Amino acid sequence: MTYSVKEIYYTLQGEGAHTGRPAVFLRFAGCNLWSGREEHREQSICRFCDTEFVGVDGPGGGKFESAEDLAGAVADCWGPRRADDHPYVVCTGGEPLLQLNDPAIGALHDAGFEIGVESNGTIEAPDGIDWLCISPKGSADLAQLSGNELKLVYPQPEKNAQPGEFEHMSFEHFFLQPMDSPDRDDNTRHAVAYCLQHPRWKLSVQTHKYLDLD
């Protein structure tokens, strides 16, 4: 299998349960809920995506002909290791589960990485993922109903994208993340209020945007 990757880069995880943790971000190209092109945004299932995932022209991006080549590029991005390192890779997109398969998971593990995945949940996750974050989008039906973290961009207008629709699912953490838009301050206030009224939910803030990190 050839893996199409938008970019690979080293930074801090900016949101969710692992906020502040050093990680290599492995951003796969392509998504099943939006083409990534602005002319298609309003007709797509996910209309609020804030990520560039079209093509393979980002830093470290390209076509990788094998799982071993892909894992090698991730390892090179992490760089030299100390004995107490805990290398972590976040597989994201787009939608990473369109491409992240058993050989890639095995190769990343063989390279010494703990594997995190950020998925829209419309594709059932394969075995072997160490940390699974599901972020439901609009009216899309979920195929993955369990994991470590459910991170809901808030607010979304669709009935099946309301927080109460997910509380019966098997996740360790439930996060509300204010939608990044011109209304971000209002969205943040509403998310804070919801968390205070529903303590099962915690607030996730996109700290990388406030800190101007990649």
Image: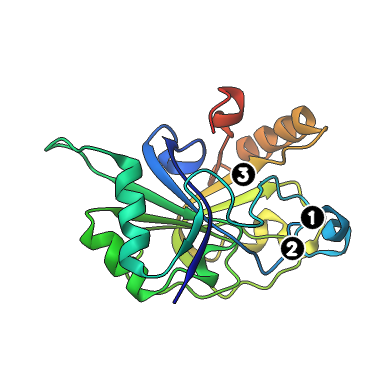
The N terminus, quarter of image:
bottom left
Query: Can you identify the residue that label 3 sits on?
Result: 176
The C terminus, quarter of image:
top right
Q: CA distance from mark 2 to mark 1?
A: 7 Å
Say which quarter of the image contains residue 82: top left
Which structural element holds mark 3? strand
Foreground residue, 33 or 194?
33
Q: Nearer the viewer, mark 3 or mark 2?
A: 2
- In percent of width and height, residue 171 lies at 46, 59
Q: Are marks 3 and 2 in contact (CB under 8 Å)?
A: no
Residue drawn at the location 58% of the way across and 63% of the way down:
95
Foreground residue, 210 or 193?
210
Establish if 209 lies above or below 61: above
Q: CA distance from mark 3 to mark 2?
A: 22 Å
Residue drawn at the location 65% of the way across and 33% of the way down:
192
Q: Earlier in the sequence, mark 2 or mark 1?
A: 2
Query: Can you identify the residue that label 1 sits on?
Result: 47
Residue drawn at the location 79% of the way across and 56% of the way down:
37
Q: Is residue 50 visible?
A: yes
Query: Can you identify the residue that label 2 sits on?
Result: 34
